[in-house]
Image (cartoon, helix red, strand yellow):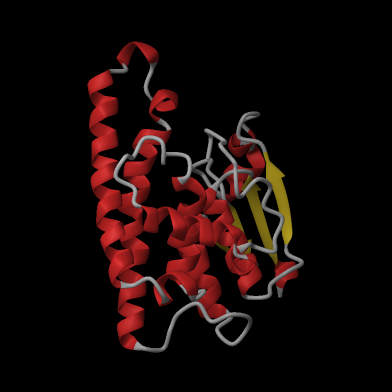
């Protein structure tokens, strides 16, 4: 099965990690994979463009089925290989509802975090403003406070069980939020301890070849 799969990925890219972790969770080792360089613009190569006209990574293909959005690829893998590996969607309707809510709500967190992490990279030097930086950090701080409230209410299942919530939000954000802790003064000890637990717990370390997943600062991700 895995031999019919091809994944083109880039180091330091959370969307790529999501797909790689999902493949590992579903015991789909042995797939064809190729590591490409963002800095060398290899994500705009003919090989990638043939699979993903947007010129973005990951580019994933199973047989003649192409899925380039990481969430779509992960949900596809769970749907096609339900009885294999770890079950990523809980049976309990309440748990399932919470999982989907947090999973997609995490996209908003991603957007606000990216506005802080990648501001200097995305905005030309002559167009940068201290007021924009301050505003972006304040918005991110408010978002972090919201998620801290979620942690207070649910510190167990949502962060420990290997569901889509864990796969697509908790794990990735734990590795990235450390990049902006210095910008977010409101982060509580509970939040930081949760991040530390996720990053140091052997059970949360992906078995696949993910260079620098704990400390990577690749601006191109």
Q: Is residue 218 at least partly visible in the picture?
A: yes
Q: Is residue 69 at least partly visible in the picture?
A: no
Residue at the outermost top position: 126
Given residues 68 and 74, the one toward you in this image is 74
Placement of 44 over or under 210, stated as above or below? above
Q: Residue, x 36% and y 73% (percent of image)?
A: 99
Given residues 35 and 151, the one toward you in this image is 151
Given residues 86 and 37, the one toward you in this image is 86
Q: Quadrant of residue 154?
A: bottom left
Q: Where is residue 139? Give x, y as percent.
A: 24, 40
Q: Where is residue 68? Give x, y as percent.
A: 52, 55
Q: Where is residue 43? Give x, y as percent.
A: 60, 38
On screen, residue 177 versus residue 206, left or right, reads: left
Marks counted in the figure total: 0
Residue at the outermost front position: 189
On screen, residue 101 versus residue 65, left or right, reads: left
């Amino acid at each position: 099965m895995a031999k019919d799969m091809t994944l083109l990925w880039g180091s330091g890219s959370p969307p790529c990690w999501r797909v790689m972790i999902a493949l590992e969770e579903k015991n789909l080792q042995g797939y064809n994979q190729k590591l490409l360089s963002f800095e060398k613009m290899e994500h705009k190569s003919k090989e990638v463009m043939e699979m993903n006209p947007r010129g973005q990574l990951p580019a994933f293909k199973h047989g003649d089925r192409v899925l380039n959005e990481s969430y779509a690829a992960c949900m596809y893998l769970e749907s096609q290989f339900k009885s294999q590996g770890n079950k990523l969607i809980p049976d309990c309707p309440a748990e399932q509802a919470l999982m989907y809510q947090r999973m997609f709500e995490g996209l908003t967190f991603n957007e606000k975090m990216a506005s802080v992490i990648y501001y200097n990279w995305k905005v030309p030097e002559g167009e940068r403003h201290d007021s924009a930086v301050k505003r972006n950090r304040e918005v991110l701080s408010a978002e972090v406070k919201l998620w801290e409230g979620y942690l207070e209410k649910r510190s167990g299942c949502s962060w420990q069980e290997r569901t889509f919530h864990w796969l697509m939000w908790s794990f990735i954000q734990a590795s990235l939020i450390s990049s902006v802790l210095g910008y977010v003064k409101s982060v509580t000890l509970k939040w930081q301890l949760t991040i530390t637990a996720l990053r140091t717990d052997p059970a949360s370390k992906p078995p696949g070849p993910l260079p620098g997943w704990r400390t990577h600062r690749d601006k191109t991700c």
